[in-house]
Amino acid sequence: MVESARSFLSSQNLDAKAFSDFLELPLKKAREEFEKLYIAEVLKKFNGDLKKAAAFMEIDISNLYRKINKYGLNHH
């Protein structure tokens, strides 16, 4: 997941304001916000295909499903 997170970050055009907003958050909250954004983008990349998204993120599908429910993301 680390390598795919790095490639995701490098593909995003975060402006200075967006980046500084993340820096203002406590570490746990910033991590959760990043994870939610990352999962949403990966799901979009694979058109909601959980199997492909989980493989890309190198996590098991049940863990991905749990995170989707945690963040209230739509995978369809």
Image (tube, rainbow, N blue to C red):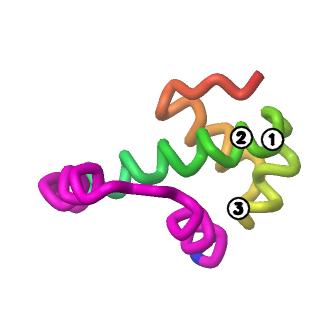
Task: Give 7 or 34, whichever is nearer the viewer.
Answer: 7
Give the Cα separation between the discs numbered 1 and 3: 10 Å
Secondary structure category for the residue under label 3: helix
Vertical side of 56 occupied by 44: above or below: above
Give the residue furthest to the bottom.
Answer: 3
Residue 14 vs residue 7: left or right?
Answer: left
Q: Which residues are magenta?
A: 3-27
On-image quarter of the N terminus: bottom right
Task: Give 60 or 56, whichever is nearer the viewer.
Answer: 56
On-image quarter of the C terminus: top right
Vertical side of 4 occupied by 60: above or below: above
Give the labeled residue for mark 1.
Answer: 50
Secondary structure category for the residue under label 1: helix
Q: Are marks 2 and 1 in contact (CB under 8 Å)?
A: yes
Which label was assigned to residue 43? 2
Q: Main secondary structure of the magenta part?
A: helix
Q: Amino acid at mark 2?
A: Leu
Give the mark, 1 or 3, whose residue is nearer the N terminus. Answer: 1
Residue 60, quarter of picture: bottom right
Secondary structure category for the residue under label 2: helix
Q: Amino acid at mark 3?
A: Met
Give the Cα separation between the discs numbered 2 and 1: 7 Å
